[in-house]
Amino acid sequence: GAVVSQHPSWVICKSGTSVKIECRSLDFQATTMFWYRQFPKQSLMLMATSNEGSKATYEQGVEKDKFLINHASLTLSTLTVTSAHPEDSSFYICSARDDEDRDFYEQYFGPGTRLTVT
Amino acid sequence: GQNIDQPTEMTATEGAIVQINCTYQTSGFNGLFWYQQHAGEAPTFLSYNVLDGLEEKGRFSSFLSRSKGYSYLLLKELQMKDSASYLCAAMDSNYQLIWGAGTKLIIKP
């Protein structure tokens, strides 16, 4: 149980275009979802936290108009990178948490999406 | 402020034992997680400690001392597949994970 999927697993796009990444919890209700970014040889950087049906909470330094997050249902959250630039190239990872069920609020991670902007 | 410290890199020999340390400072505390991350992959859960003491799970064990703000991950009978980054993360009073930078573990034959 507790499986999180991400789509696509990798994407290449041209500078100036937008890219949407989907994160789905397959067998549990994700009341909270997290979006991380990871640059090579660095640790996870939390970008934003989203709760189903409400606006995402962005970490300091993350542009909310550039990284649009929509947590429309208890099983789906999307991250849209708008007007992508080469510096947005990174590994984007989502995680999901069922706040109603888990004793210790474990986050389950998706497999990640590697974005390359040319 | 909130902070997690762990060594950047460690090297060990196949078959040996290695201990990866982690110290933390958080606003409130709701537990300490260890994750394993292979290059290019997402993290996978290894262990969770909220009470002081040692939790053993096969070849991996995790220890916590709340009074010292200290944890370690102990890996026994090292295998080549254990070469990965090991991430320490503390959960604060808001149930948010504060992540360390990760320890890259290199296993040599």
Image (spheres, rainbow, N blue to C red):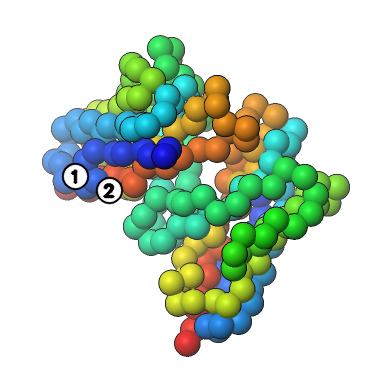
Q: Is A8 on the left-hand or right-hand side of B64?
A: left
User: Which residue does the image show at 41% across and 61% down from the upper left?
Assistant: B38
Q: Position of residue A63 (x, y in %)?
A: 40, 27
Seen as rendered, the residue at the extreme top is A53
Q: Position of residue B52 (x, y in %)?
A: 80, 49
User: Which sits in the foreground, B9 or B12?
Assistant: B12
User: Which sits in the foreground, B48 or A15?
Assistant: B48
User: Which sits in the foreground, B59 or A42?
Assistant: B59
Which amino acid lies under the numbered mark 2 shown in the image of this protein?
Arg
User: Which sits in the foreground, B45 or B43?
Assistant: B45
Q: Residues within 10 Å of mark 1 (few under 14, many from 20)?
A: some
- Return the residue at label 2: A114
**Disc 2 versus disc 1: distance between alpha carbons?**
6 Å
Which amino acid lies under the numbered mark 1 shown in the image of this protein?
Val
Q: Residues within 10 Å of mark 2 (few under 14, many from 20)?
A: some
User: Which residue does the image show at 47% across and 66% down from the upper left?
Assistant: B84
Q: Earlier in the sequence, mark 2 or mark 1?
A: 1
User: Which residue does the image show at 48% across and 70% down from the upper left?
Assistant: B82
- Return the residue at label 1: A11
Which secondary structure lies at badge 2? strand
Asked where in the image residue B97 lies, by quadrant, the reply is top right
Q: Which mark is residue A81?
A: none
| Chain of the residue displaying label 1 | A
Asked where in the image residue B71 lies, by quadrant, the reply is bottom right
Same chain, labels 2 and 1: yes
Which secondary structure lies at badge 1? strand
Q: Position of residue A113 (x, y in %)?
A: 29, 44
Location of residue B80 with respect to A111 vertically, above or below: below
- In which quadrant will I find the N terminus of chain A? top left
